Each structure stands twice: as structure tokens, then as C-alpha cells.
Amino acid sequence: MASAKTDDSHIPEIALSGEPSSDPRVVFATYGCHEIFWDVTDLVKKLLRDNPVFGFHAHEDVMGGDPEYNNNKTILIIFEYNGKFYYLDQLNRSPKINTDSLIEAAKLEDALTAYGKHNPGEDPRLF
């Protein structure tokens, strides 16, 4: 599995699809810790397409291995929803990730932005 680049040598193309969608559309996903992150975009798209309601737990058995043994991993999913970009990040083995959890992450960011609690793109859990 390829590592996600942390420098400017490869920047994934992330662009709005043109038509706002009522379903989240994954544009990039990465899984790992410290300096070792794997690009799991295609895998996450497949997991959500195959199980939109049931979803999946982000852990080494599902994500294709263990990028760094004996350390907590994080999954970061950047997605488009209703014509805007959002993200969801969580530790491995946290609650299941499904279509509803992506929608809830978008609603939380929109609500906090509307109430002036954070700037878009900042982690709303820090406030």
C-alpha cells in the first residue's frame, strides 16, 4: 500500500464535482500515524458504497494492515456534501464510519460555523 505524501511532490486533485450531492462523496482518505499515512481513498469509497448504513471500523484488519505497530492510528476522510468540502477524522476502532457519520460531521461543522464558534476547516471539537 502506498504512503500518502506529506510534501508537495504529490497533491491529490480535490475539486467540487459541479453538482451538489445529497450523499457524501469521498474525495480523499488517509490512515496511519506519525509520518506514516496510507492513501486509503479507494478502499474507503468501496467500504461506504458496499455498506452505507452498516459502515466500517477503521482498524488494521479493515484498512489493509498496520502502518505502525503498537500505536493508535487516525483516519482522515475529506468529502464533499451539498457542494461544500468537509472532513471527518477519528482514531482507529472508534465508532463505525458510515454515510450518516459523514453527514453528521458536515452538520456539526456548519452549525458551529453559523454560531461563530470556529472557522471552517478547524477542528470543531477544539471549541
Image (tube, rainbow, N blue to C red):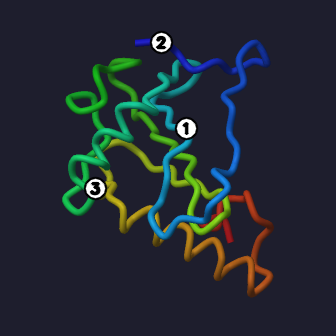
Return the x and y of residue 99 as percentages of the image width and height. Answer: 36, 61
For the residue marked with disc 3, what is the amino acid?
Lys
Q: Secondary structure at mark 1?
A: strand
Alpha carbon distance from label 3 to label 1: 18 Å
- Mark 3 or 1: in front is 1
Q: Decide: is 30 above or below 4.
A: below
**Marks 2 & 3, CB-CB < 8 Å contact:** no
Q: Secondary structure at mark 3?
A: loop
Alpha carbon distance from label 2 to label 3: 24 Å
Q: Give me the residue at 62% from left, 61% from top.
A: 19
- Earlier in the chain: of badge 2 and badge 1, it is 2
Mark 2 sits on what residue? Answer: 2
For the residue marked with disc 1, what is the amino acid?
Phe
- Earlier in the chain: of badge 3 and badge 1, it is 1
Q: Which mark is residue 28?
A: 1
Mark 3 sits on what residue? Answer: 96
Q: Give me the residue at 74% from left, 84% from top.
A: 114
Task: Quadrant for the N terminus, please.
Answer: top left
Alpha carbon distance from label 2 to label 1: 14 Å
Q: Secondary structure at mark 2?
A: loop
Q: Decide: is 125 above or below 32.
A: below
Residue found at the far bottom of this picture = 115
